[in-house]
Image (cartoon, coloured by chain):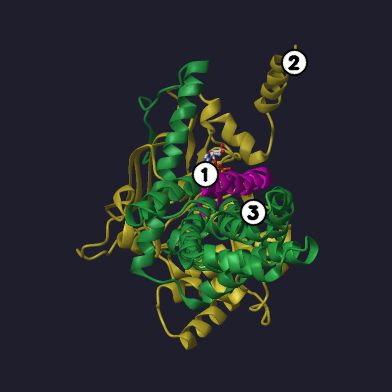
Chain colours: A yellow, B green
Amino acid sequence: MSDAAPTAIQADPPAAELIEFQDVSIQFRHQKVLRGLNLTLRRGETVCVIGESGCGKTVLLKLIIGLLHPTSGRILFDGQDVTRLAGRDLVKLRLRFGFLFQMAALFDSLSVYDNVAFGLREHHVCDEDRVAAIVAERLQDVGLPQGLEHKKPAELSGGQRKRVGLARALALDPEVMLYDEPTTGLDPIMTDVINELILQTQRGGDKTGVVVTHEMRTVTKVADRVVMFYPLARIGRGESQMIYDGPAEGLEDAADPRVRQFVRGEAGERLRELAAQNRAASP
Amino acid sequence: MAVATLNPEADADEGPETAVHRLGQHVFDRVAEIGDVGLFSLKTLGWIFRRRPRWSVLVPIFYAIGVQSVSVVAITGTFIGMVLAVQAFHEFQMMGLATRLGSVINISLVKELGPVLAATMLAGRVGSSMAAELGTMRVTEQIDALSALGTDPIYYLAVPRFMACLLLIPLLTLMADFMGVIGGAAVCTQVMGVDSFAYWKHSRDYVEGLDILAGVLKSLFFGAAIALISCHRGFNSTAGAEGVGKAATEAFVFSFMAILFLDFVLGLAWNTTYRAIWPQASGLL
Ligand SMILES: Nc1ncnc2c1ncn2[C@@H]1O[C@H](COP(=O)(O)OP(=O)(O)O)[C@@H](O)[C@H]1O
Ligand SMILES: [Mg+2]
């Protein structure tokens, strides 16, 4: 990444901040998931979001493209308030993003080809010949063999599904990629394949990216910056939900023991907490 | 640099839970849900006037809904006609009115049983399977994926199903009517020995085209309600196999309740209108 350009001429560069969470809280019925969150993502950086299951990582991604609405606060993308967009404006915003869903979320009733072509066709981006060319190119980019186009998602392996999902997300050449647990549930080899693909996508296109993951190898490989969340249910009232924000290299010797434990995969306090919960539950 | 901070003031814990709280919450939820179905319906209707879904989306859905429902409607229609005949025969025989069975059976079929039966079957077969399908799409994030790709899920998923239910239910109703009429006639004339000529003559004299039309018009409302309720249940399915199962069951139960409610209201409205236009219209028989 060209972090500093010392001989930069006095041109007007686009604002460095691309996505801004301003005091964002979200609550489902009685469950608060995010509380007073302030987070700024810069153009061109790849941010890994880590944290245990249920701490609100997927919710964070869905907030960015308006799939969920915050209970309070604002989310700005490139200066626009996402929470106020609707109709055509919201569609336009969403087309600037590519979203790789956790289980790929391929459309069951459509073939691999139709899945990847979906966005191109729905928005009449180009004629059918061009669609075919783009689909073939994207499938090749993610390393899928020929002859897979006409299979249904149910006939694919987990790794193949993820890669089709990636191809679909990239079809419209988005500025920002959102990856929700791209390697969860994959074998180590496939995990590395996906990591390489993410790296290639992020570096090659100089895209902004948010990668939600549990996989430390993904973090060390792709992250410019790491943010760690902690479930709201287990922190004190005034305490920060974001317990780490910094480079991947700093994780191992972070000041917060919870960060070090997560990175090393140690249960630590959690074992004692769980035991205490069990004792409290049984008479 | 600390670009990221958390605001400690933004905090409010949930208060205590009492029975009154829960009851209030329950009532509030139900009202909100009805409002939500209304909003969902408006959005669906809004799309119909703006943009028709493409044929490649519509045709498979029409086909699936037709295939799923035709046989059950035909079979249950036949049986309901036969059951009516069996149940009514003895009373009418005793009064010496056996040949009038045709008018009673057939008017009940075209005005009430045909439309309600076709709608019930549509709700049971198609409504619950739509809710399960859309519920699965919800929990596997396919509905979110549609939005993320800039396509309105209501336009892409609910509108074609709504159109299919609305356009197919009159045909299903006519089929239920027809099969019921055949079933009733078969039992009366072939099994009970009612004179066939008199049976059909009374049917023809008594059942008017307007009665059939009344049933068909009613069925349009049933079809719309089934599609909207079932799609709404699917879209709001909660996670897991349990959530999807619940969506499917609720789709049927709520659709059925809506069918009976609409049947009552529309029946009342139709009769009031009918009598306002033809004050001396005859009653039954
Ligand atoms: N649409 C929703 N309705 C209700 N609760 C939700 C919804 N989405 C997420 N949640 C809840 O929010 C919490 C965080 O979810 P999520 O962001 O998916 O966690 P993760 O960090 O594992 O991705 C979970 O406890 C989940 O139950
Ligand atoms: Mg998640």
Residue indicated by mark 1:
A57
Question: Residue B25: x and y, percent?
Answer: 47, 26
Residue A49 or residue B241, whichever sits in front:
B241
Question: Secondary structure under badge 3?
Answer: helix
Q: Tell me if label 3 and label 1 are in contact, CB under 8 Å.
A: no
> Is label 1 within 8 A of ligand 1 (CB to nearest ligand atom)?
yes
Residue under the point 37% across and 63% down = B47
Q: Residue furthest right?
A: B191
- Residue B282 is marked as none
Chain letter behind tag 1: A
Q: Specify the quadrant that holds the N terminus of chain A.
A: bottom left
Rounded to the nearest angstrom, the CA distance separating label 3 from label 1 is: 38 Å
> In this orientation, does residue A9 appear?
yes
- Residue B124 is marked as 3
> In this orientation, does residue A199 appear?
no
Question: Residue B108: x and y, percent?
Answer: 58, 55
Q: Which one is earlier in the sequence, the residue at label 1 or at label 2? A: 1
Q: Specify the quadrant that holds the C terminus of chain A.
A: top right
